Image: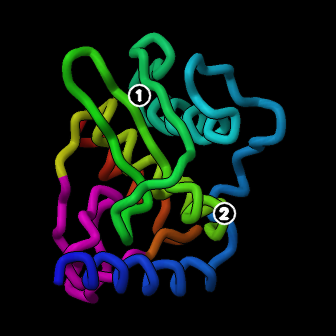
């Protein structure tokens, strides 16, 4: 039942995300990303954006110095877009290749930031919802029925919440 709920949540989220433009279009990701050892190049701009968003909120985040690694590869668990493995000096993000191939930049950012929330910020899931039914946090587990709305109008609020707990 959990897997069905996860898949349904992802499908609903993808539907909502496809209705919105790229909320992060104000970030020029063309050639500004730093290089990160042991991180797939496709993730560099998202790692860089995570550091920049933290900096905008007064945090000095250095994912490379923290040894955060990341790959895009198949995740065998159905409905799982990303994972973070951490412990014993390992902080590793995996993003599902099928998710990546079908997601827009907005939703890619959402999932990468969610996993970095675990791996770097040590954030747990936050399944709170606003009165209108929208999820409060990027750190939502995907197992409850709040709506994930990550758009130009909600991005700043969700990032404030993400980095405020650090």
Which numbered circle lies on residue 15?
none
**In the image, what residue occupies the spot 43% across and 86% down?**
12
For the residue pair 130 and 94, the one nearer the viewer reads as 94
**In the image, what residue occupies the spot 66% across and 63% down?**
101
Secondary-structure class at tag 1: loop
What stretch of residues is rendered in magenta?
A: 125-148
Q: Magenta span has 44?
A: no
Q: Are marks 1 and 2 in contact (CB under 8 Å)?
A: no
Residue 142 is drawn in which quadrant?
bottom left
Secondary-structure class at tag 2: helix
Can you say which quadrant of the picture contains the C terminus? top left
- Whole-angstrom CA distance, mark 1 to mark 2, is 33 Å
Dot 2 alpha-carbon crowd within 10 angstroms: few under 14, some 14 to 19, many 20 or more: few
- The residue beneath circle 1 is 58
Which numbered circle lies on residue 101?
2
Query: What is the tally of numbered marks visible in this picture?
Result: 2
Please state the horizontal and vertical placement of residue 91, each as a whole percent of the image. 34, 26
Residue 32 is drawn in which quadrant?
top right
């Amino acid at each position: 039942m959990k897997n069905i709920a996860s898949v349904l949540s992802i499908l609903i989220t993808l539907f909502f995300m496809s209705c919105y433009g790229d909320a992060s279009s104000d970030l020029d990701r063309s050639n500004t990303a730093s290089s990160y050892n042991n991180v797939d190049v496709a993730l560099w701009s998202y790692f860089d954006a995570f550091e920049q968003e933290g900096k905008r909120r007064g945090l000095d985040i250095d994912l490379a110095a923290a040894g955060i690694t990341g790959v895009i590869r198949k995740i065998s668990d159905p409905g799982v877009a990303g994972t973070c493995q951490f412990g014993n000096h390992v902080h590793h993000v995996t993003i599902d290749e099928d998710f990546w191939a079908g997601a827009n930049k907005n939703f890619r950012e959402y999932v990468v930031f969610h996993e970095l929330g675990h791996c770097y910020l040590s954030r747990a899931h936050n399944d709170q919802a606003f009165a209108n039914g929208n999820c409060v946090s990027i750190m939502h587990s995907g197992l409850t029925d709040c709506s994930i709305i990550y758009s130009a109008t909600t991005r700043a609020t969700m990032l404030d919440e993400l980095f405020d707990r650090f």
